[in-house]
Amino acid sequence: MSRTTPLFQEHQQLGAQMVEFAGWDMPIRYDSLMDEHHAVRNSAGMFDVSHMAVVDLHGERCRDFLRYLLANDVAKLKQTGRAMYTCMLNEAGGIIDDLIVYYFSDDWYRLVVNAGTRDGDLAWINQHAPSFDVAVKERSDLAILAVQGPDAITHLTSVLSRTAAAAVKELKPFQAWHEDHWAIARTGYTGEDGCEVIVAADDVVPLWRELLNKGVRPCGLGARDTLRLEAGMNLYGQDMDTETTPLVSALGWTVAWDPEDRDFIGRAALAQQRAAGTTHKLVGLILDQRSVLRSGQEVQNSDGEVIGTITSGTFGPTVQRPIGFARIRKDVTEECVVNIRGKALKARIVKAPFVRQGKVMPGILGEDNAS
Amino acid sequence: MSNIPSDRRFTESHEWVAKAEDGVLRVGITDHAQSKLGDLVFVELPEVGSSLNAGDACAVVESVKAASDIYAPVAGEIVSVNESLADAPDAVNNDAYGEGWLFTIRPSNEGDFDGLMSADDYSANLD
């Protein structure tokens, strides 16, 4: 039996097409995935992401614990409500999960982790927490709603209390406001402005309905995937896993090497890989002809040598081209070839993101199409 | 439930087959199929002149989420393909039984058409 979120009946009433995702029964699309995608790029959409796990950490030594557990350094979070993106690594430097960590107070931090890695994450965290006297509490009583798009904050603040609305309007990226069971952060997975709202399960249905009345479009996991791909954001399990490190996953920027004496799990292995030099890299790919990139497709260089694999692929609804990420040999630059059903199609290697704030990034469409 | 036209035949794999001119058959996918697939972003069509056996995978329709094979409903030779789908694959979503046709095929045996499912049988199969 798949698990369902508190919004399950809302999804059913809207006629959503449901799929099993990481043990959860989730909406993949309500009607047209394309329309959902464009709603987020041009106005506002909302995603039920309550399948993700919220884990609260309590204890005086929380900060020390997280500086050891995570590859990014929570010491950078100095004001209450500040948040950061980070990887959690194993001893070999492999990625156990990518997550967002919130700093609420010196003895209270919050992690939001992927649904598919929940069990492994909790086991790993629980294995290391006792040495720091940190209590680990999963908050399955909470739901998460991502409200994304250029009009997202306007719509969201129009349905919040006056105090909450005033606070949310002032939020900077990766900053959260919280009160009682509510935490609203200016974060997302779409490349657009917006918030992720963590609320008590009982409060999420009225919030959903009010936003629906404001014209915020319900969006499924399908649009979430095309949006995050265009935004150049990795998906755990596809673009990275325990066999890959941040250094070969375009996530080197999330590893805090300074201060040098901070010991975090995976540091030694990462330092070794950095010193030896990496052989592969995760890059963006774009095709200038109609097709669709898919994970698992083989990537070759111009001599026909296999140099890597597509890790995520789609047809980008905003870019209007086939796009994807590929892990390829580091020496290959500019161009490669993707084999699709026996045909060798030329692909350009580009720097993600493909799209930010509704606009295709410069250089993505190639020189021929520069305007 | 979408309207299933009674002027043509159907396959279990959700292709429709209509009689065109000169004994040639026009083939597409049903409205039910396009609705299940979602917005199509790419259609790969067979080579004109290629010879196919019934059930051969001969075309591919791709939505954002998945690629699906299209099968030759009868044995025969491809006469023409709907080239306008190269730039506008969404015609299959908007008009599956009309503008969104995929290809025409000259059947090896004219009688094969009658062996395909009727609209009523196809409709019953969906329930």
Image (cartoon, coloured by chain):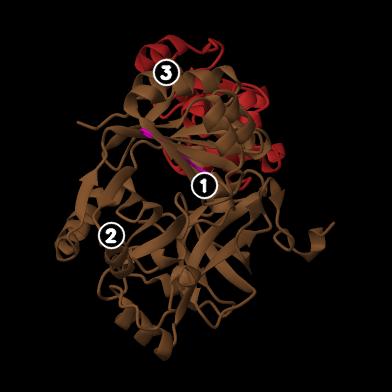
What are the residue bounds of the magenta stretch? A180-189
Is residue A238 shown left or right of residue A107? right
Name the quadrant of the C terminus of chain B: top left
> In this view of the protein, which residue sits in the foreground, A119 or B54?
A119
In the rendered image, the residue lying farthest to the right is A371
- At x 37%, y 84%, the residue is A271
Chain letter, colour red in render: B
Instruction: State which chain is coloured brown.
Output: A
Observer-nearest residue: B49 or A234?
A234
Q: What label does residue A187 carry, if any?
A: 1
In percent of width and height, residue B32 lies at 48, 22
Disc 3 marks a residue whose amino acid type is Met
**Image: B8 above or below A165:** above
Judging by the rendered image, the residue that carries numbered circle 2 is A62
Secondary structure, mark 3, is: loop
| Residue A352 placement (x, y as % from top left) | 60, 62
Separation (CA) of disc 2 from disc 1 = 23 Å
For the residue carrying disc 3, how many other residues have a C-alpha within 10 Å: few (<14), some (14-19), or many (20+)?
some
| SS assignment at label 1 | loop
For label 3, the residue is B117
Quarter-of-image position of residue A366: bottom right
* Main SS category, magenta section: loop
Mark 2 or mark 1, earlier in chain: 2
**Helix, strand or loop for disc 2:** helix
Choose top left, top right, bottom left or bottom right for residue A156: top right
Subunit under mark 2: A
Front label number (3 vs 1): 1
Quadrant assignment, res A145: top left
The crowd level at tag 1 (other Cα within 10 Å; few <14, some 14-19, many 20+) is many
Horizontal arrangement in the rendering, residue B124 relative to residue B35 (left or right): left
Say whether residue B47 is visible: yes
